[in-house]
Amino acid sequence: MTNRLTSWKATAAAALLSFAPVAALAEDWKFAIEEIPGSIMDSYAQEFKKRIEAATNGDVTVTVFPMGTLGTPTETVEQAADGVIQFTNVSIGNLGTIVPESQVFLLPYLLPSDAALISKILSGSDTIYQDLNSDFQKRGLEVMTMYSQGPQVWTTNREIRSPEDFENFKMRVMVSPILLETYKNMGASPTPLPFGEVFGALQLGAVDGQVNPIPTIEEMKFYEVTSHLIWAGEQELVTTVVAGSDWFETLSPDRQQLVRDTMAGMTGYIDGVVSDFNQARLDIIKEAKPDIGLVVLSEEERAVFRARSGDTAAAYIDTAGERGQDLLDALKAELAGN
């Protein structure tokens, strides 16, 4: 990967040059995100920019590149590994082809339902920042931080409270063997589709539902073409900020520590942003569509789906091998201790 120039890299280089100042005196760090301006990821990147530029008195500037500017999320991860850009913020689902071991966070009902506990494990887990990070490093990447954008919510064309309700139900998912297995085990017919095609597929009835956090559902207007929002508690949208290992190692120890300290200090900030975003966007949906069905599954209802999804871990092990089993065991042990 690091020794090959592909067409996307040429495109990315042209885009980066178009954003570069004519006579830049400051070191410029490029930070790509997979979401639009005004999103949760943009809020994170802009706050990081503000803190780094203040801490370095302008010796470092940070340029944020929103969704699509430099290519697909997977391409921006490759660009970070190759040193074309310095940081990228992508969801776990978009790391599967590069770091299969990371897909452990797609497993249903793995993380707790308590937001504070989720934040604690994602920001401070030894399994993530030591064990799993070594798998990232093998691909030329460094895990800087992880955070959740909130619970995944089903938008559906009918009420779903049991696996039986999922019969003959086409659920749009990302192209991931783990997600395919998850929804098959839950009783649905998982249907992979590119993200840009989801609204039209829902509108035309090509799929019956999809899953995303509330901010994405509001931004993409998925609620306009579905009738219910359902909180099943099965998953969080986990997102990761990565840097290129080679580039990061060129930084002085003080500068490396600044980056790590800055991101560690942003945990409380982004948790607040995520909470505010989810509530504000839900309020927008409720105002725009007062008759939309809001369903929060009970613990008993969730337990049925949890039991049905127990075999999904096998799909992760098939993807990540024995290494995946070791990571899953270590993560479960950490979660049990919190």
Image (cartoon, rainbow, N blue to C red):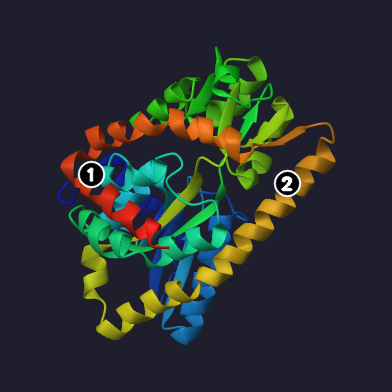
Please, which residue is most extreme toward the front here? 300
Q: Position of residue 28 (x, y in %)?
A: 40, 71
Please name the residue shown 42% across and 62% down the image. 121
Q: Which mark is residue 59?
A: none
Mark 2 lies on a secondary structure that is helix
Q: Is residue 126 above or below residue 281?
A: below
Q: Is residue 157 above or below residue 31?
A: above
Are discs 2 and 1 less than 8 Å apart at CB? no
Asked whether residue 151 is in view, the answer is yes
Q: Is residue 19 left or right of residue 242?
A: right
Asked whether residue 5 is in view, the answer is no
Q: Amino acid at mark 2?
A: Leu
Callout 1: few (<14), some (14-19), or many (20+) C-alpha neighbours within 10 Å? some
Q: Nearer the viewer, residue 175 or 86?
A: 175
Mark 1 lies on a secondary structure that is helix
Q: Which mark is residue 282?
A: 2
Q: Is residue 126 left or right of residue 249?
A: right
Q: Nearer the viewer, residue 17 or 86?
A: 86
Q: Is residue 246 left or right of residue 237?
A: left
